[in-house]
Amino acid sequence: MARFPIFLLLLSFAFSGCETEQQSSVPVAPADTSNEALARTLDALAQRDSDALLSTVSGGSKAQEFFASVIDSFEAIDSFREKFVDVYGDEAWTAFQAPLPEDQKRPDMNLTMPDLEQIRRDSSEWEADDKNGGVFDALPRIPLPFKQIEGGWVVDGARVFPDEETLIGFTETQKKLTEFIESYIKAIGHKGISSEDIDYQMGKDLMIVLMGGEFKVSGESPNPDRFKIDEL
């Protein structure tokens, strides 16, 4: 069965602009250059600094709320990984993240995180220009559009999604995924639950969260529950 990386929902980014500039929740502080704006954005993501990230994002409070939800997801994954490794060890975490063999068809989870330090090093000379259209696309599944406004360069939050309805929907889904990860932290180390059980059950349950249900054969799931998170 397919794996479900946490940023699965971000694969549908479309750069067309959802609306005109609105008031932001966090004051926008433009950078002198597009490269500086990118560097500040990557550093804020790496440091899980929501205010620093939002200060680079134009497009109004709803655009900033989406980027804040990304930071929340990063923090949830950090907390999950820290407890998982503390309880089950580094090898178990590597196995949790590893793809299943092709002949194994069962639910499987993945919490892939971008290597922000490497991306930061690789982007040291990046600048917005006509060739790239101002879009930095080296961050996996999160292409970032930049623009120049009065005072300098910012992330063009209004150009990330085609319309406000889509923006709100993606934010809500991102929040739902964050809550999903946080809910599974209590399963780590629970009596009778192994690291592989968590990998399996999270993969199964995330499909239900994202798709609204699961595939069944004659009314029965081909992948029986190993535990129920709501019963722990």
Image (tube, rainbow, N blue to C red):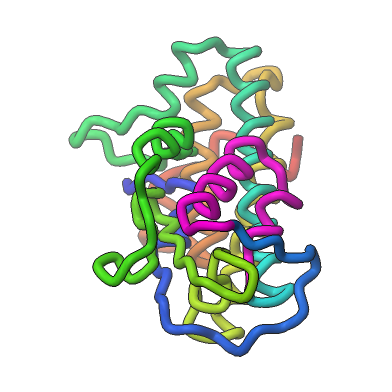
Taking the view exactly as shown, the residue that stands out farthest to the bottom is 20
Q: Is residue 14 a member of the stretch shown in magenta?
A: no
Q: Does 197 appear above or below 74?
A: above
Q: Does 198 appear above or below 95?
A: below
Q: Does 116 appear above or below 19?
A: above
The part of the chain drawn in magenta is 32-58
Can you give x and y, in whole percent of width and height, for residue 113 in the image? Answer: 47, 38
Taking the view exactly as shown, the residue that stands out farthest to the left is 103
Q: 105 or 153: nearer the eye?
A: 153
Q: 118 or 152: nearer the eye?
A: 152
Can you give x and y, in whole percent of width and height, for residue 218 in the image? Answer: 38, 62
- Tell me the quarter of the image containing the C terminus: top right
Count of numbered tags: 0
Can you give x and y, in whole percent of width and height, for residue 206 in the image? Answer: 53, 51
Q: Main secondary structure of the magenta part?
A: helix
Horizontally, is 83 left or right of 135 in the view? right
Q: Is residue 49 a member of the stretch shown in magenta?
A: yes
Q: Residue at x 47, y 31 (%)?
A: 117
Q: Does 204 appear above or below 185?
A: below
Q: Is residue 172 among what the camera can see?
A: no
Can you give x and y, in whole percent of width and height, for residue 29 in the image? Answer: 70, 61
Q: Is residue 74 among what the camera can see?
A: yes
Q: 82 or 24: nearer the eye?
A: 24
The quarter of the picture where residue 98 lies is top left
Q: Residue at x 64, y 13 (%)?
A: 87
Q: Residue at x 40, y 49 (%)?
A: 139
Q: Residue at x 24, y 67 (%)?
A: 131
